[in-house]
Amino acid sequence: MAGSNGNDLKEHWDNVYSKNPDEKLGWYESDFSSTLNLIHKTALDKAARILNIGAGSTHLVDELLKLGYANLIATDISKTALERLEKRLATDAVKFIVDDLTKPTILNSIEAVDLWIDRAVLHFFTKKEEQDIYFDLLKELVKKGGFVLLAEFSLDGATVCSGLPVFRYSEEMFIERLGADFQLIDSFSHTYIMPSGAKRPYIYTLFKRS
């Protein structure tokens, strides 16, 4: 997870992860079918470079490793979250990068990727300048022929998450922000059930860069 205000946000997310086990986090998933169905549609080789944006301590990376993907990058603003993930995975198949998506210092210099995965990160960027930096980085890093998977709070979704305001999205808004170089492959609504039992409406999309 990530957001704005630099050190304040790093501290916020480090505190969230240090105080909560994975299964108590408000975005924890044990069923990854929504994301995996879209990944399968990419038909990418198992050696494809996959960048998981705002990975936190997600168990999606575990699933991708089980499926044979061996060139994964997990990034997050929270060092605490990534250290937890790295300790759990204990593999050389994943590279871990602590960075701020709104002020990237490492991500803007890595090699291009075949797939950009973002579940529940972009919606934390409520300012236009943050969103612009995010999409500029995305367009810089995703290869021609590569894919972008965005899963964010939908227009009828929550307005606050983890104590922070969020910016909600529609399929049309993603199309506009990505531009003509990106073709929509699939889109669907999904209601995520939080560990607390609360419902969170999401919009899931998959784009391919022409």
Image (tube, helix red, strand yellow):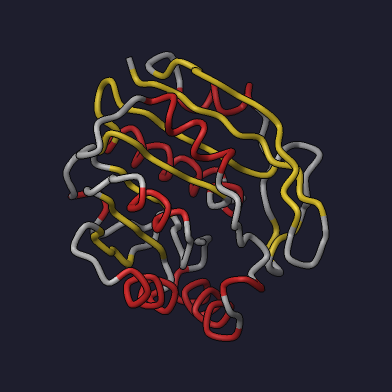
Residue 210 or 109: which is nearer the viewer? Answer: 210
147 lies above or below 180:
below
User: Residue at the spot x=28%, y=45% of the render?
Assistant: 69
Residue 10 vs residue 188: left or right? Answer: left
User: Residue at the spot x=58%, y=51% of the render?
Assistant: 120
Image quadrant assignment for residue 21:
bottom right
Residue 111 or 21: which is nearer the viewer? Answer: 21
Image quadrant assignment for residue 179:
top left
Residue 167 vs residue 178: left or right? Answer: right
Instruction: List x then y, in percent, for residue 32.
Output: 55, 47
Count every numbered label the image shows and give the total: 0
49 lies above or below 91:
above
Instruction: List x then y, in percent, for residue 50.
Output: 30, 43
Residue 85 vs residue 151: left or right? Answer: left
Instruction: List x then y, in percent, for residue 90.
Output: 27, 72
Q: Quadrant of the C terminus?
A: top left
User: Residue at the spot x=40%, y=58% of the render?
Assistant: 62
- As drawn, the residue found furthest toward the bottom would be 19
User: Residue at the spot x=35%, y=59% of the render?
Assistant: 75
Residue 1 or 63: which is nearer the viewer? Answer: 63
